[in-house]
Image (cartoon, rainbow, N blue to C red):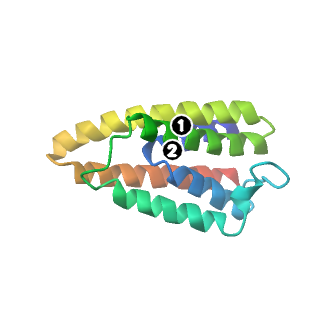
Amino acid sequence: MILALAFILGIVAGLRAMTAPAAASWAAKLGLLNLAGTPLAFLGYHYTAYIFTLFAIGELITDKLPKTPSRKVPMQFITRVVSGALVGAAIGIAAHQLIVGLVLGAVGAVVGTLGGSAVRGRLASLFGKDLPAALLEDVVAIILAVVVVTRLG
């Protein structure tokens, strides 16, 4: 079950690259994800959750700007996969299955990136503009992140 959470948080990374590490960091900070003594312990440090949260808020804002590049261009895509791998690894390492968690998080990020782009495009067509679709995607990413964090505890 816990490794399914790595995949789901990877999907979140595909939707919003910084929301996933913010969620993992809050889970570690709150003691819901035990990373003490691991190379990923920094996620639970006092200020890390705040820093990732600021990045996540910034991403939520910049995602709506007209000049923001597609999530499918190499730099954006790679960032999402790395973010998914990081959060998957954090969940995996807590379950003593680092590699499995890392892979599931990365695969989830690919699914979230490509699937999120396709769904958002369709919704934008239905709405006649992108903003409502983008806001709906924000809500889905945040809800999934909260669900994962609450299941970790």
Asked if labels 1 and 2 touch by Cβ distance under 8 angstroms, the answer is yes
- The residue that mark 2 highlights is 13
Distance between mark 2 and mark 1 Cα atoms: 7 Å
Q: Nearer the viewer, residue 68 or 33?
A: 68
Q: Residue at x 50, y 60 (%)?
A: 55
**Label 2 or label 1, whichever comes before in sequence order:** 2
Categorize mark 1 by other alpha carbons within 10 Å: few (<14), some (14-19), many (20+): many
Q: Residue at x 70, y 30 (%)?
A: 100
Left or right position of 126 against 111? left
Q: Quadrant of the N terminus?
A: top right
Q: Which mark is residue 133?
A: none
Look at label 1 and name its amino acid.
Val
Image quadrant holding the C terminus, namely bottom right
Residue type for callout 2 = Ala
Q: Residue at x 72, y 39 (%)?
A: 92
Q: Label 1, on which residue?
A: 81
Residue 116, located in which quarter of the rendered image? top left
Q: Check the image and report above or below for 68 versus 84.
A: below
Quadrant of the rendered image containing residue 27: bottom right
